[in-house]
Amino acid sequence: MGKKKYFTLAEANALVPRLETMLGQLQGLKRDLQRKYHQLQEIKKAYSEASTLQRDAFFQEEAELEFLMWSANSMLQQILDTGVEVKDIDTGLCDFYAVMGGQEIYLCWKQGEPEITHWHGIYEGFIGRKKFE
């Protein structure tokens, strides 16, 4: 893990449109990954005594699953490299380190919100969100 990046509210808000796109891509990859995983489990269950042809099908499915995992991890790493912490992929909940009143805080953003309007203490979590005044 690298050094913490601290954001101003303006810097974090400038990143929101890009983050919205990247999270959408990551969520799509996660859905594809889950679907492919369940598909592979069903195939393996149905063909426990697989022929060579079926083993090749497993190989293809497993290769696709590995590629999806690599793609999802790569996309997540791109987001993390911006300095943003992804708290929940499904809801698109993200935190940005910031300093307010000499205290370290998180600027809190949830996918779908046009801009960052909330913050919370480092140990408070989403439930401790407070609206900027």
Image: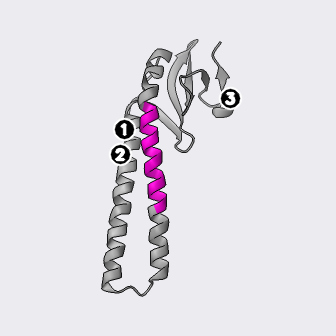
Main SS class of the magenta portion in the image: helix
Query: Could you tell me residue 62's position as x and y percent?
Result: 36, 67
Residue 73 drawn above or below residue 10 = below
| Residue 128, disc | 3
Quadrant of the rendered image containing residue 43: bottom left
Say whether disc 2 or disc 3 marks the residue closer to the N-terminus: 2
Q: Nearer the viewer, residue 93 or 105?
A: 93
Instruction: Give above or below for 13 relative to 84.
Output: above
Separation of marks 2 and 1 at Cα, in angstroms: 6 Å
Whole-angstrom CA distance, mark 1 to mark 3, is 27 Å
Q: Which residue appears at 44% of the width and 18% of the height? A: 11
How far apart, in angstroms, are the residues tagged by discs 2 and 3? Answer: 30 Å
- Mark whose residue sits in front, 1 or 3: 1
User: Which of the image's four quarters has the N terminus?
Assistant: top left
Question: Which percent across, then down, holds residue 52?
Answer: 30, 84
Q: Amino acid at mark 3?
A: Gly
Across and down, in percent, residue 34 comes to 49, 59
Judged left or right of residue 53, residue 24 is right
Report whether 110 appears left or right of 84. Answer: right
Is 116 colored magenta in this rendering?
A: no
Query: Please, what is the three-letter code of the amino acid marked with disc 1?
Result: Gln
Q: Which residue has dot 1 on it?
A: 78
Assess disc 1: are there few (<14), some (14-19) or many (≥20) residues with their C-alpha within 10 Å of its C-alpha: some
What secondary structure is marked by label 2?
Answer: helix
Identify which residue is drawn at 44% across, 44% down: 26
Q: Which residues are magenta?
A: 19-35
Q: Secondary structure at mark 3?
A: helix
The answer to whether the residues at label 2 and label 1 have Cβ atoms under 8 Å apart is yes
Residue for badge 2: 74
Name the residue nearer the viewer: 31 or 99: 31
